[in-house]
């Protein structure tokens, strides 16, 4: 009997430990796949959020660059119009010029055309056909020096409104000026040219346009004749490639191997990469993705609203030679430049955490199995030791135990009392007796104690049941609170990471803006110095023109004096002629005695006639000279007034430029303060993110502890109920 009880105790202990270990291992394995899917889903959500912020950050970068260059272009157009007005405006001469013209949209694909147009003049200056940058073109190069960028003057070619470049500083691929190229009134696809549609309506066009062989940020203004008809247009622009943040976007990485590219959204260049990324697949994106859903997503992206982002998961080949893999792409549309911004991240970049989690769960399963085996061995050892001690005294007390097991403790105590019949004092002295008596004494003590204990347990179980229910409710409430707190900390961690990335991007953008602002201040300072020199030169020219006018007036006065002298000579000649006639008459009267005198009279009359003719010629020449001098005096007066107005305009322009310089110089320290603030914000966001990660880990441990406490409270509640049921079976006195 003892051996069987001993083995039973060992078997039960080992079985209980084995079941506990097996259930734990099975639970871990069953939850491994579910945890992996949840981890992958959360990581994908985080990746999409990061992709959204990255592509919107690139769009913000483009918006800033576009705003700066539009301001420069519009200021250049204002300067061009002021200079054109100051020079006397555009007019057409009586002569014509033959042009060999080329459609800028079909360069190299179609032969040139021959057209004959009136000669274009700016004020009194002929523009000619200057293709060399070594020879200065009037008006164009002057505006380019004042405003920077490219400048062009167009002449209307036909009634439809096509515009010919007659003077420009835009370079062709061969390095010459791009005169002779024209903007057609319709595009190759038959649609109206968007630039000419606006300009021919008498309005100013602002925006992105294809100029000769590249994309420019441009402004076009109409040139009107006296009747208000559009006869040409002026243009200023800056190459888009010189201002876009191409280097920043081309080097921008997303995750381990992700990247950002930009694609032209529409037109004949649709699908062409505007900015390429090293390692990304090159070529026309629409052509590469035409047979996939991704191609439809790229086409639909041009209809997105500002700051609207769409996501697409698809198979993609990055470098042109490797196998395709699954990627997630975020797309947004920057309408001012007609660019689709594409951020792409391979799925492999965010699957690594799932692999690590699977490894950790597998390691936990293995560790739990090994630890369970150790626990089973220890339990078996303790069961063997305890079973040996329990089995021997239990065999002697079987009968009493059966009565007690039946719940009749009072009868068991009475039977033991009749058998043993010992007082409490005698039971206290039973330690020196043999083991049988000790067992009997112990059973009697146990029975009496159990009788008292059962009574107390009945009373305590009621209170314990109430306490267990309160503990269960409290633990459940704490568990729900910790779960909400953990979700909130996850949201805060995600937000702080996004803030950190955005702050870093803004810091880089502000630094670039500060550099451009400094360069603008230097260029404006140089322009101011040139204006001061020009104002001084124009002042000297105005003074000189005044002196010339004064001297011409003096010449006019001298000519008037000459006219009076000539009048006197004419009267003398007339009088001399009369005297010679009288002398001839007197000589005739004197007959042969007056012959000599008659000859002298004829010579005097002949000389008088010559003198009268010469004085008439002199009088005519003096009159012509007076007319020319009077005209010169008038022209010099008008020129002097024009120079005075030019000096005033130059002074006003210098004052405006000085104001611009002061504003640009005041902007630099503010940009530096913004940069420092962005840097501090990025550091603070990183510190907050790290603290929230630690707080999230603590919340997770708290949630696990609350869950364990909830389980323990449930077990306690069940145990109390079982205890009440068992205690109810006992009969006590």
Image (cartoon, grey):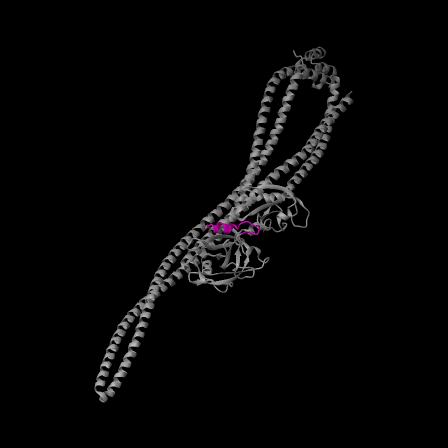
Is residue 194 magenta-colored? yes
Q: Can residue 543 be seen in this view?
A: no
Residue 259 picture location, percent across and down: 60, 47
Residue drawn at x 59%, y 26% is 476
Main secondary structure found in the magenta portion: loop
User: Nearest the camera: 133 or 453?
Assistant: 133
Residue drawn at x 38%, y 62% is 538
592 above or below 209?
A: below
Q: In which quarter of the image is residue 638?
A: bottom left
Locate residue 609 relative to residue 376 in the image: left or right. Answer: left
Residue at the far bottom: name it: 592
618 above or below 5?
A: below
User: Nearest the camera: 467 or 345?
Assistant: 345
Q: What stretch is highlighted in magenta?
A: 186-201
Residue drawn at x 61%, y 26% is 710
Is residue 582 magenta-colored? no
User: Nearest the camera: 252 or 137?
Assistant: 137
Residue 559 picture location, percent across and down: 29, 71
User: Nearest the camera: 83 or 98?
Assistant: 98
Q: In which quarter of the image is the C terminus?
A: top right
Residue 497 picture location, percent across and down: 55, 41
Residue 196 picture location, percent across and down: 50, 52
Q: In which quarter of the image is the N terminus?
A: top right
Q: Can residue 432 be seen in this view?
A: yes
């Amino acid at each position: 009997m003892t051996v069987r009880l001993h083995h039973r105790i060992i078997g039960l202990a080992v079985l209980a430990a084995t079941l506990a270990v097996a259930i734990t291992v099975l639970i871990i394995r069953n939850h491994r796949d579910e945890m992996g899917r949840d981890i992958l889903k959360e990581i994908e959500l985080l990746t999409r959020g990061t992709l959204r912020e990255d592509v919107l950050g690139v769009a913000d970068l483009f918006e800033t660059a576009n705003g700066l260059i539009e301001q420069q272009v519009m200021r250049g157009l204002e300067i061009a119009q002021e200079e054109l007005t100051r020079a006397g405006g555009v007019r057409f001469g009586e002569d014509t010029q033959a042009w060999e013209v080329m459609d800028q949209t079909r360069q190299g694909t179609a032969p040139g055309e021959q057209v004959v147009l009136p000669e274009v003049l700016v004020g009194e200056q002929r523009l000619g056909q200057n293709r060399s940058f070594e020879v200065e073109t009037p008006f164009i190069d002057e505006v380019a020096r004042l405003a920077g960028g490219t400048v062009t003057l167009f002449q209307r070619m036909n009634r439809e409104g096509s515009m010919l470049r007659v003077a420009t500083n835009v370079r062709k691929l061969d390095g010459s000026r791009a005169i002779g190229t024209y903007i057609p009134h319709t595009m190759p696809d038959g649609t109206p040219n968007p630039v000419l549609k606006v300009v021919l309506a008498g309005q100013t066009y602002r925006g992105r346009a294809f100029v000769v062989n590249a994309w420019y940020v441009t402004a076009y203004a109409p040139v009107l004749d006296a009747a208000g008809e559009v006869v040409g247009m002026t243009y200023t622009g800056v190459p888009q490639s010189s201002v876009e943040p191409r280097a920043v976007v081309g080097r921008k990485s997303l995750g381990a191997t992700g990247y950002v590219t930009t694609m032209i959204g529409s037109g004949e260049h649709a699908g062409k990469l505007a900015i390429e990324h090293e390692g990304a697949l090159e070529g026309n994106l629409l052509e590469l993705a035409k047979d996939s859903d991704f191609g439809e997503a790229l086409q639909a992206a041009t209809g997105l609203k500002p700051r609207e982002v769409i996501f697409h998961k698809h198979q993609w080949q990055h470098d042109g030679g490797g196998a395709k893999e699954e990627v997630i792409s975020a797309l947004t549309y920057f309408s001012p430049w007609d660019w689709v911004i594409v951020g792409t991240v391979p799925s492999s970049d965010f699957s690594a955490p799932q692999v690590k989690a699977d490894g950790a769960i597998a390691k936990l399963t293995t560790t739990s199995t090994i630890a369970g085996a150790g626990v089973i061995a220890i339990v078996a050892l303790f069961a063997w030791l305890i079973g040996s001690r329990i089995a021997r005294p239990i065999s002697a007390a079987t009968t009493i135990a059966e009565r007690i097991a039946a719940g009749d403790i009072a009868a068991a105590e009475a039977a033991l009392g009749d058998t043993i019949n010992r007082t409490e004092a005698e039971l206290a002295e039973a330690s020196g007796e043999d083991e049988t008596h000790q067992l009997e004494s112990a059973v009697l003590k146990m029975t009496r104690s159990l009788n008292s204990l059962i009574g107390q347990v009945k009373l305590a179980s009621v209170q314990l049941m109430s306490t267990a229910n309160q503990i269960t409710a409290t633990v459940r409430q704490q568990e729900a609170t910790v779960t909400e707190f953990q979700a909130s900390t996850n949201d805060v961690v995600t937000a702080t990471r996004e803030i950190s990335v955005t702050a870093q991007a803004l810091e880089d953008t502000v630094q670039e803006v500060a550099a451009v602002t400094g360069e603008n201040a230097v260029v404006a300072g140089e322009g101011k110095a040139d204006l001061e020199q020009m104002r001084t030169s124009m002042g000297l020219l105005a003074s000189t023109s005044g002196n010339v006018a004064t001297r011409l007036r003096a010449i006019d006065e001298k000519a008037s004096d000459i006219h009076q002298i000539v009048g006197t000579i004419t009267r003398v000649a007339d009088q001399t002629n009369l005297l010679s006639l009288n002398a001839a008459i007197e000589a005739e009267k004197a007959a042969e005695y007056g012959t000599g005198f008659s000859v002298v009279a004829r010579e005097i009359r002949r000389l008088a006639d010559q003198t009268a003719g010469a004085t008439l010629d002199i009088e005519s020449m003096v009159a012509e000279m007076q007319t020319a001098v009077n005209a010169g005096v008038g022209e010099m007066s008008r020129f002097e007034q024009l120079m005075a107005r030019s000096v005033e305009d130059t002074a006003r322009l210098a004052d405006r430029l000085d104001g611009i310089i002061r504003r640009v110089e005041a902007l630099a320290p503010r940009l530096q303060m913004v940069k420092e603030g962005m840097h501090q914000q990025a550091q603070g966001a990183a510190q907050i993110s790290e603290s929230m990660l630690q707080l999230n880990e603590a919340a997770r441990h708290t949630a696990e502890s609350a869950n364990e406490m909830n389980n323990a409270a449930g077990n306690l509640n069940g145990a109390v109920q079982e205890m009440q049921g068992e205690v109810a079976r006992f009969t006590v006195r």
